[in-house]
Amino acid sequence: MKQGINLGLERVERNHPLARLVWPTLFLVTLLHGFRALRTGEELAALREEVSGVEEGLETESPAMDDAILQRLRQISASGLAAGHSATAILALIDSSLPSDMSLVALTIHPMPPSADVVIDARAQVAEDVTSFQRNLAGSPLVSSTSLLEERRAADGFLSVRLRLELRAP
Amino acid sequence: MMPAIVWPWRRPRIGFAFSDQWLVVASDGSPPAFSELPPGLLKPSPLAPNVQSVAELARLTCQLVEDLVGRAGMAVVALPDLAVTTALFAAGSKLKHRELRTAIASRSASPELETRSDFWRGFRHEVLGAAVRNVVVRQYEQIVEATGARLRWVDTCSLARIPGWAQESKSEETMVVHAQLYRAHYSLAVFRSGELIDLRFKLRPPGTFDGVVGEISRLPGLYGAPVGSLTLSGEGASACAERARETFDFGRISTGEEDERGLISGSVRALLRRLT
């Protein structure tokens, strides 16, 4: 019988019949990532140029109008933020942390500057998925603490849970 | 010890363990060495890289190795529990290796190609699985490589002892429960006649026991058998045992190491035995 779990690379190289493909595959994946990063960089540079072109073309008629535009821009930049994190960043965190057998039911973001908290309602078949989900969230630099508010087995056999996250200001 | 220049093949076997608070280095025949990590240097996560500065942690690790044994030979590593995704597949599941890999990758919420996994089959054909993201485990491997050690075994703090406990509980008719209390989480491993029937990892606020005692007290109802033996070790094990006695009749209750450092050192010693 095996002595236990071994997550070392040596075991993978020795036991896996396709081990010789690991390094070429990693090389190709890295190359692909690099290529994609380059493409993204080029797109960003093009966008930046376009934005600076638009900025240069902007002409306002008076200092009062400048102030009004500035005020409006500040409002836009401050909207949709919770503890300094955009709602999309919070959604991306939950998306990447949610085990595939678990489903999201509801999400509530309470912005309370300078911090914020998020309440997540979700359903899972097994309790381990809930633990994985909570553990994945707790490991994120966005999150300062997690707590399981509620966990109950519904009539259909699924586990309904409610989790609360406290977000850390960046 | 003989100088390594005379006996180059006698390099000591060495074990490393990491938590968000402690770095532990242990070797055969000498007491373990500890280093308290600066806050924020290591934050265990199964998804994101855990170590804020690999160079700094490697420096601390090399220093401990230098103080403890001079130079390292073969090495084992116990990763933090919270850096690894675990799963227990019941004895009747009969999943093949490929299916197990897919199942545990889906549970870890990371792509299968970016995940390293391994499985241990128990005495009743139950399967314990663990998966870790390459970007996560690579950081720890770099730190161990910086000490000059040859890495032979990578496991986690809590899982390292499970095969040994399964062996010990083979002759027990009642349920045997091992609870490991870390500062901010705990693990529960439940055995019946040598079979690992339940494994749980839960986060806990430091210094609280209600969650773990409540969870253990529900086990007899869940599995239809009394808890014959309960072993608690780690942060506040004695206080937790006292609370358990007040709450429920658990049969035998024993306590092990009394803090997180002792708990982690015990796991490293269990891993070191695998090299013999």
Image (tube, rainbow, N blue to C red):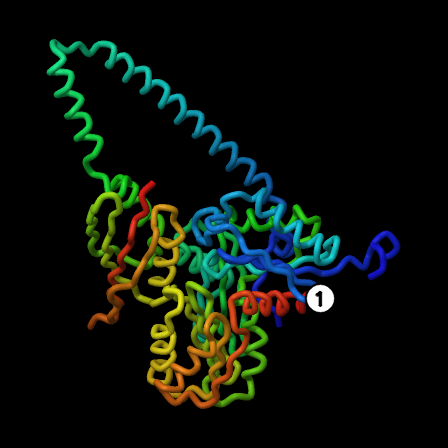
Residue B150, horizontal then vertical, whole percent = 69, 53
Q: In which quarter of the image is residue B30?
A: bottom right
Q: Is residue B97 above or below residue B116?
A: below
Q: In this view, does B35 lie above or below B167?
A: above
Q: Which of B30 and A38 is in front in this view?
A: B30
Instruction: Determine which residue is flagged by label 1.
Output: B30
Residue A99, horizontal then vertical, whole percent = 35, 56
Question: Residue drawn at (70%, 55%), measured in percent from left and top?
Answer: B67
Looking at the image, residue B208 sits to the left or right of residue A88; the answer is right
Q: Which of A47 and B5 is in front in this view?
A: B5
Quadrant, the N terminus of chain A: bottom right
Parent chain of label 1: B
Q: In this view, does B250 lie above or below A21?
A: below
Does the image show residue B154?
A: no
Does the image show residue B248?
A: yes
Residue B99, horizontal then vertical, whole percent = 46, 60
Question: Residue drawn at (39%, 27%), measured in percent from left and top?
Answer: A40
Question: Residue drawn at (44%, 75%), measured in percent from left and top?
Answer: B92
Dot 1: element: strand
Count every numbered label the image shows and give the total.
Answer: 1
Residue B102, horizontal then vertical, whole percent = 44, 57
Looking at the image, residue B206 sits to the left or right of residue B151; the answer is left
- Badge 1: residue crowd in 10 Å (few <14, some 14–19, many ≥20): few
Quadrant, the C terminus of chain A: top left
